[in-house]
Image (cartoon, helix red, strand yellow):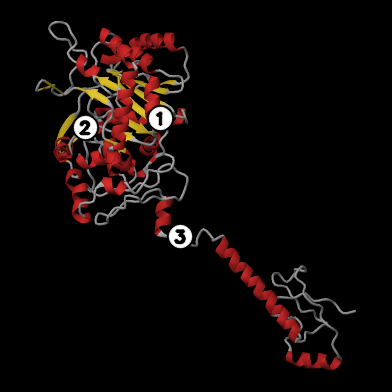
Amino acid sequence: MPRRHSLALGSPASSSSSIASTPRISSSEARSHTQSSPSSSSRSILGGKAYPNERHRAPSRPMRLWMSMLFGTFVLFQLATVFAAPSPLIGITASTIAAQANVSYLPRNTKSSIGLESRHDNSTVSRNVLLLPERQRASQEGDTTLEDTNQKSTVGTETQTSLTGREANIAYFLQVSESTLLHLPRLLDSIYHPRNTYAIHFDLKVPRDDIQKVSQQIRTKTGNAGNIHIMPSELITYRGVSMLLNTINAMRLLLDEDETWDYFINISGSDYPLLGAETQRRLLGRELGLNYFTFAPRSKWDQMAENRMAEIWFDESLSFRQNAASGELQKLAIRNPLVDTRQFDITHAEAWMISSREFCDFVVKGDMARKMLVAFSYAADSSEHYFASLAWNHEKFRKTIVTHSMRMVVWNHEGKASGQHPYYIDERKTNDEYRFKDLIDTSVLFFARKFKDPDSDLMNYIDERAKRNSTITAAENHLVSKVGARFVRLREL
């Protein structure tokens, strides 16, 4: 009984790929085969072991045909597997690498594509794409307006859908200084809602005993509410980058503590709401994913950049100090080369904003956001430039900008400018009437600032007015109008 010989396609030791038995051969055939075959210790062409007491003869024609068909089927199967599920090393392109890095900057002389989005992963921010400055884009692209471009594109299925009747969850950041500490209890009570979340920061210069007294007042009204978070106190320099960093820290804390909020609103202790918490939730719930900034006219941007970034402004808080040496921003007589070499627009807007969760996540985690943060580290009033410039220069987020932060701020009254700070809303006339009560009566905005008194009859009046149907309807119509005309407003800046 002759042995069986397996023609292995893999390892010589494999027995699972046996395809034929070696037939018995005559002695004459054996002699002929011995003369033309390799030695008995050699291996077969397909890797099978040659046994010492047997010799191979050439397979018959049907056998060769069968073997060819089997081998061809194996090769086709392998090719199909490769193309159906490619190796990670196959098909890597420059765009794939850029997508994995979550960053893609447009070269200076490259036209930007407003509608370009990457779908490489499930991240909320599609790409960190830097748009060209407007003055450069205009010369390269002609008179193409954002309004025309965006009529053909959407922000995304999750952020563009109108959500009438839905309430947005809001994350509020309250930045409290020593001068506004006593405002906090009433302010927090006026915007409190159990489904919102709140981050409160007390400047390191505020005495600890005073903070304890105010905190006790808050606990008396809200109890030990789990949606109110007290941040570690930091030293904040007025007009310095520490104000900006403090806001970013608040964004990160709120993102970590609550996964449900949709919008971020930052306010100071001297702000007061003109609309109640329920109304703000309902109005912002109409459409998610937008970002509200009050911009200065574009014609003033370059001059403001020259004033606030042309020289180095040093914030002593960057030294990790625990007490203020001067408490003021220090201007150094050193020219900042960024102003002359930049390839992006430095915008100017109010530091107070309403931002989408997606944008806040980008501020905290985005590559472009970190790079731009460094660019504004030694600028004056960087919080009035950084957030708006980041949204403006980003390919996706520019389409989400609404050109008003929904704050009532009075900088000019009866032809007279207020100066470095806005007028106090609760300022009184000589006859003891509130000077700006008429403006409040016609306001359709979310907040007013600044208030000098922590508790006043004007605040009582504002609370009563915020409940009126006429107030709510007017505010809703105004918001719908602003959102609907946002592309026109961007072009008109």
Q: Residue at x 38, y 47 (%)?
A: 127
List the residue tagged with mark 2: 314
Discs 1/2, front:
1
Quarter occupied by residue 164: top left
On screen, residue 41 versus residue 144, left or right, reads: right
Whether residue 353 is visible, yes or no, is no
Q: Residue at x 38, y 36 (%)?
A: 289
The quadrant of the picture occupied by the C terminus is: top left
List the residue tagged with mark 3: 92
Report the amino acid beneath label 2: Phe
Discs 3/2, front:
3
Whether residue 48 is visible, yes or no, is yes
List the residue tagged with mark 1: 285
Depicted 40 relative to depicted 77: above or below: below
Depicted 451 relative to depicted 407: above or below: above
Where is residue 201 shown, x and y percent of the image? 35, 21
Q: Residue at x 70, y 72 (%)?
A: 9
Q: Gap in Å between the C-alphas at discs 3 and 1?
A: 41 Å
Where is residue 282 shown, x and y percent of the image? 40, 26
Report the amino acid beneath label 1: Gly
Q: Gap in Å between the C-alphas at discs 1 and 2?
A: 40 Å
